[in-house]
Image: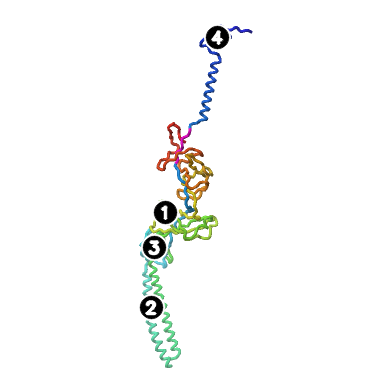
Amino acid sequence: MIVSPSPDMPAPGAPCDQGCRPLWYPVLVFLFMIVTAACSEQQAASNPPSRPPTPVRVAPVLKQTVQQTVTLVGTVEPRKRSLVASEIAGIVRNFPVKEGMMVKQGQVLALLRTETLDIQLDAASASQREASARHQQAKRDLVRTRALFAKELVTQKDFDDARAEEHALRERLSQLEADIRRVRDQLNKSSIVAPFDGWITQEFTEVGQWVEEGGEIIEMVDVSHVHVEIPLPERYVRHIHVDDAVRATFDGLPEFEAQGRIFSVVAQADLVSRTFPVKVDIPNPSLTIKSGMVSRVTLQADQPHAGLVIPKDALVLRGNKAFVFLVKENTVDQIPVTSGVHLDDFVEVNGTLQEGMTVVMEGNERLFPGQPVRVLPASAAMPAPGSDQRTEGGARSP
């Protein structure tokens, strides 16, 4: 079939009029636009906008003498605790002390009625005086009998009887004098006094109450020194010795710290926990520390040695790895380390660090190796994490 050309179409090979465009021209323009857009996107992807330096605060790596410490928890006990009891039975006549009172050694805690003892003392004294008079008479009789016996005016039996009488009355006198001392001792024991300076922590009697021999009167404690017993793990026991200095803090006294010394290391470990009881003595002249408080005692657990230390905030922990960011020519390198002794706000580290190197101590939460950083002066405030900081070009810092 032969198709006749349209009258509107130019004949093949005929020249086009002005404004005439080939049919494929729009297609060519469309392909050019697609290629141009793709090249622009590729160029944008290959040249992303540069991130601004991350602001950080740094600290030097220091070398100093360090010593491992261990902190153990114990309970405060008084140096002395006494359950004061009565040595004799009786009725309480006077009870002048109360719980919480401070008492001095020898101060009266309770008085018992002594009327019966006074009567016994009077009777024993009278019997002693009678026996003393009889003994004196027996001594004189023995002197006369001895003289008569020497002249053979009395028999041997008379002399022996006189001597036995004097001896019996002398022993009777000694017995009565002992009775007097016993009653006087009971009279002294009717006054119950404090055995040492301390605080009364509990009462067990009252005026008019009958007290048995050995009956409890009060409990008192001496807290001028306090003791703390702590459980020491066996791996530390070879480093701990009597008279070693310790430092103690108390949960109930947040701003208070006391110094003390070890006075006992028990040689027998607890068979369940495998810990050794260690007893610490802490002076308490101001009586600030009270019995029963929770105490945290810090001991030196090894020999001093030289080590590298950094601020604790410079140590980054991610999973089971520890590392620091080392500042070098306004960028950071990630340096793996292992931590050692903790010293207040510092921590000992082991690794490839050297004294005098600079590590990031603030702003290291989101750093990565090779990232540019800007070191802030010590007085400058750190930007808050996640704050929307913008540079002059409008980019947001990480």
Q: Do the residues labelled 2 and 1 touch (CB within 8 Å)?
A: no
Residue corresponding to mark 2 = 128
- Check disc 3 and give the amino acid type: Asp
Q: Do the residues labelled 3 and 4 touch (CB within 8 Å)?
A: no
Circle 2: is it few (<14), some (14-19), or many (20+) Cα within 10 Å? Answer: many
Q: What residue type is labelled 1?
A: Glu
Query: Alpha carbon of mark 3 to alpha carbon of mark 2: how far?
Result: 40 Å
Q: Which three-letter amino acid code belongs to the residue tagged 2?
A: Gln
Q: Which mark is nearer the camera, 2 or 4?
A: 4
Query: Does residue 315 belong to the magenta stretch?
Result: no
Q: Where is residue 105 in the image (x, y as percent from the top left)?
A: 38, 64
**Kind of residue at badge 4:** Pro
**Which of the numbered marks, if any, corresponds to residue 257?**
1
The residue under label 4 is 15
Q: What stretch is highlighted in magenta?
A: 50-56
Depicted 144 relative to depicted 303: above or below: below
Asked whether the residues under the numbered discs 3 and 1 touch, taking CB atoms below 8 Å apart as contact, a structural biologist would say no
Which of disc 1 and disc 2 is earlier in sequence? 2
Residue to which mark 3 is pinned: 197
In space, the residues marked 2 and 4 are separated at their CA atoms by 169 Å
Q: Which element is circle 3 on?
A: loop
